[in-house]
Image (cartoon, rainbow, N blue to C red):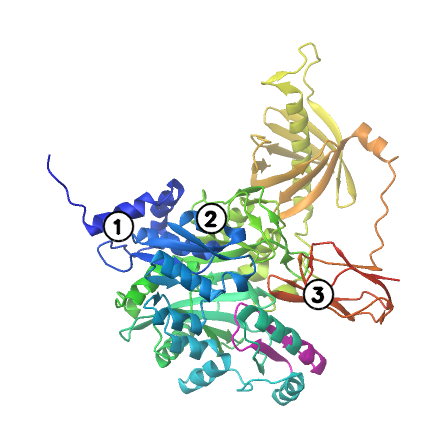
């Protein structure tokens, strides 16, 4: 028998295929629609890469490594031992307990993991150590490649003060402000007065919206300085702050850059990131509806100029604020892979993780500026475990007892690091996934996003899909008339969910009534036959009472096969479906209009929670007799909450400012709760004396826990 030699290239092919699950293999086939770049397994890069991150970005990097035939090492905290990124990697090393400063920010433990596994390179993802110059320096000292820029670029661009000075020298447009470190709250007030309100207080080493506050007067400046410095120290280990002029009502548009070690640098078009809450992005798109070719080119050239000024080599992002006249100003440069990079990949066909790995190995870029296209349109919605009805999104924790991504839909991409059964904890960012849709036009991408959100099943935690769907269907967003103030301007009293039009209310009532009848009929049958053979003929008509938003509606339902004819308010609606009540998704046709609803819960008492047009509505469906009897039931008296301060979210207590017997004024701070590294001030709802305090600094509290009682 002839002997066959397995070449290194073939070994890498076999390795890539061996470690990819069936779903991942399908993903590779489907991803050809997104990536036009080739994966040359004969091109030698690294044998093993450690990913110094967790969650979706760790999974994202691992996927590209597998396509390139590279072995991967995951690091994890003890609570992440069963996380998806740990299961995907070829090896995994625990680097400490749950708190980030003891695990994912623990450089000593990560360096030991590198030595133990023999990893040749490290991809830092975003956040954590991705922009930490000391980490990059320690890697270089041990001969391990950092997949990102060198320490000089990280230092220069990671420091907001230094980066602004470099940008000015590189002739990049900058925002007026104080080019130095603000020492204390008193100096912050003086500088803000000199610049002129409003001002932005921000962490010098910050990013991701953390350590940022807008101040409109001296009092807000003092408070903003305190919170920003605390958040900066907690998130980045650096509490230095700077102050600059706040440009009111701008757009937030960023340029993706890519540079190699041979002097080549490209701009890969822009991403519109104006939809934000608490200075954190919620919905992004590429390209922007606002830029014309001339502005796009000018922004791209300035971004490349800045990259060249610091001898940048890797993927990076230069962020700008753009006013209504298309004047643009440098905001910051992120020396890492950006969260929203998938939408750039969709419109350019490039795999940015692959490009970062190639550049880190020393290969030159394969593209020229003229080769970078804008093919179609892409949108990204950040799906968070958050309650959007509280300040547009306060964190929610829990276990995903049911989870189904809409990846069966065409031109839909989901970057996630969780699965059914995963826990969303207080220790890390509450992002569930990045939901990306692509189309040849913006209208197509929007339509696909709407469909994807309706088909996304998330149970066990509160999520922000109601808000995301409202944003992408709002007339102003559809027109592209947006700014960073979109959310507070469109929802000045906070997000209240989808407000039903009359026709939509009728659709929802008809669907709920039909679902109730379908459940009643199913309960009467076993294996398709009536449970009692001697029972009377199957009922064909029902008179029901349906309650929605404190309105009670008389409804009549008639059945004909899988179609129910619902009569209400003088109108007739035909509701057709397969009525698979065991499925998380319920596609229905209402007078020919196709909808996808989700039945979140049903109770024997006729209470039904339906997710319709993104928002969950509570509907009560009763027979006429049951509705008449329910009038005699006593009503539950709601709790008087004016004397009780409850935690609006799970988190840890940072500070308590009152003691029993103290008198507090309305709006006075009582305590500070930190959740996912964001600090939130809890204030008194009225002037009163403190009766009792139920929390102390360092304690962990859950949503709804009593913090303080007032007399």
Look at the numbered disc 2 and give the secondary structure of its residue: helix
Q: Do the residues labelled 1 and 2 touch (CB within 8 Å)?
A: no
Q: In the image, 402: left or right of 264?
A: right
Residue 60 found in image quarter: bottom left
Look at the numbered disc 1 and give the secondary structure of its residue: helix
Look at the numbered disc 3 and give the secondary structure of its residue: loop
Q: Is residue 199 shown in magenta?
A: yes
Looking at the rendering, in which quadrant would you find the C terminus? Answer: bottom right
Nearer to me, 97 or 62: 97
Determine crowd level at label 2: few under 14, some 14-19, many 20+ residues with C-alpha closer than 10 A: some
Residue drawn at x 43%, y 74% is 133
Q: Which of marks 1 and 3 is in front?
A: 3
Residue 166, how many percent across, how many down? 43, 84
Name the residue that disc number 1 marks. 12
Residue 467, how many percent across, how many down? 61, 55
Name the residue that disc number 2 marks. 84
| Residue numbers of the magenta segment | 197-224
Nearer to me, 269 or 239: 239
Residue 636, how many percent across, how many down? 85, 43
Compared with residue 77, is residue 605 higher up or lower down, i.e. above or below?
above
Name the residue that disc number 3 marks. 697
Q: In the image, 391: left or right of 289?
A: right
Residue 558 found in image quarter: top right
Q: In the image, 110: left or right of 428?
A: left
Q: Name the residue at the left extreme.
A: 2
Q: Is residue 110 shown in magenta?
A: no
Determine crowd level at label 1: few under 14, some 14-19, many 20+ residues with C-alpha closer than 10 A: many
The mark that comes first in sequence, 1 or 3, is 1
């Amino acid at each position: 028998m002839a002997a066959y030699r397995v070449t290194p290239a073939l070994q890498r092919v076999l390795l890539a295929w061996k470690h990819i699950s069936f779903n991942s293999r399908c993903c590779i086939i489907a991803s050809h629609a997104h990536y036009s770049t080739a994966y040359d397994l004969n091109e030698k890069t690294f044998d093993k890469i450690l990913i110094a991150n967790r969650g979706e970005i760790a999974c994202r990097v691992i996927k590209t490594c597998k396509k390139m035939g590279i072995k991967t090492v995951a690091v994890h905290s003890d609570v992440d031992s069963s996380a998806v990124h740990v299961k995907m990697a070829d090896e995994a090393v625990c680097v400490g307990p749950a708190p980030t400063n003891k695990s994912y920010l623990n450089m000593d433990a990560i360096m030991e993991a590198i030595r133990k596994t023999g990893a040749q390179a490290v991809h830092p993802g975003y956040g954590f150590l991705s922009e930490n110059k000391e980490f990059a320096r320690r890697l270089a000292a041990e001969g391990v490649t950092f997949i990102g820029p060198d320490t000089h670029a990280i230092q220069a661009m990671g420091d907001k003060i230094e980066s602004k000075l470099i940008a000015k020298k590189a002739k990049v447009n900058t925002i007026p402000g104080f080019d130095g470190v603000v020492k204390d709250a008193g100096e912050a007030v003086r500088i803000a007065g000199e610049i002129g309100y409003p001002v932005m207080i921000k962490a010098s080493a910050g990013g991701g919206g953390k350590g940022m506050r807008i101040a409109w007067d001296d009092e807000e400046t003092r408070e903003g300085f305190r919170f920003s410095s605390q958040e900066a120290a907690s998130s980045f280990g650096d509490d230095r702050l700077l102050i600059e002029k706040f440009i009111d009502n701008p757009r937030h548009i960023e340029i993706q850059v890519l540079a190699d070690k041979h002097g080549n640098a490209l701009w890969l078009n822009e991403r519109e990131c104006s939809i934000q809450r608490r200075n954190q992005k919620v919905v992004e798109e590429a390209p922007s509806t606002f830029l014309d070719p001339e502005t796009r080119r000018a922004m791209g050239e300035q971004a490349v100029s800045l990259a060249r000024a610091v001898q940048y080599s890797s993927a990076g992002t230069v962020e700008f604020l753009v006013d209504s006249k298309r004047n643009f100003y440098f905001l910051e440069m992120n020396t890492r892979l950006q969260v929203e990079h998938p939408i750039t990949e969709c419109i350019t066909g490039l795999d940015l993780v692959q490009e970062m790995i190639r550049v880190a190995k020393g290969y030159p870029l394969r593209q020229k500026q003229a080769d970078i296209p804008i093919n179609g349109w892409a949108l990204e919605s950040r799906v968070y475990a958050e309650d959007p009805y509280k300040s547009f999104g306060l964190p929610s924790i829990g276990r995903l007892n049911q989870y189904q991504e809409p990846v069966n839909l065409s031109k839909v991409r989901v970057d996630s690091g969780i699965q059914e059964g995963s826990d969303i904890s207080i220790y890390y960012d509450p992002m569930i996934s990045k939901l990306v849709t692509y189309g040849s036009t913006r209208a197509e991408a929007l339509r696909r996003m709407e469909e994807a959100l309706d088909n996304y099943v998330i149970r066990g935690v509160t999520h922000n899909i109601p808000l995301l769907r409202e944003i992408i269907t709002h007339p102003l967003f559809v027109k592209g008339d947006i700014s960073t103030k979109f959310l507070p301007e469109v929802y000045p009293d906070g997000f209240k969910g989808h407000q039903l039009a009359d026709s939509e209310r009728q659709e929802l009532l008809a669907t709920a009534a039909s679902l109730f009848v379908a459940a009643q009929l199913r309960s009467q049958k076993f294996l398709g036959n009536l449970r009692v053979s001697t029972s009377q003929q199957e009922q064909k008509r029902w008179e029901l009472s349906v309650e929605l938003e404190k309105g009670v509606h008389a409804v009549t339902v008639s059945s004909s096969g899988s179609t129910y004819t619902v009569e209400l308010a003088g109108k007739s609606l035909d509701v057709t479906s397969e009525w698979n009540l065991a499925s998380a998704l319920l596609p229905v046709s209402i007078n020919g209009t196709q909808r996808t609803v989700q039945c979140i819960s049903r109770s024997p008492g006729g209470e039904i929670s339906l997710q319709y047009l993104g928002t969950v509505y509570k509907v009560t469906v009763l027979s006429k007799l049951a509705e008449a009897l329910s009038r005699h039931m006593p009503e539950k008296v709601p709790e008087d909450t004016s004397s009780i301060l409850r935690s609006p979210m799970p988190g840890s207590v940072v500070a308590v400012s009152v003691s029993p017997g103290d008198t507090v004024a309305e709006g006075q701070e009582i305590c500070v709760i930190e959740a996912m590294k964001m600090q939130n001030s809890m204030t008194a709802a009225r002037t009163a004396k403190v009766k009792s305090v139920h929390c102390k600094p360092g304690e962990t509290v859950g949503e709804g826990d009593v913090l303080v009682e007032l007399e």
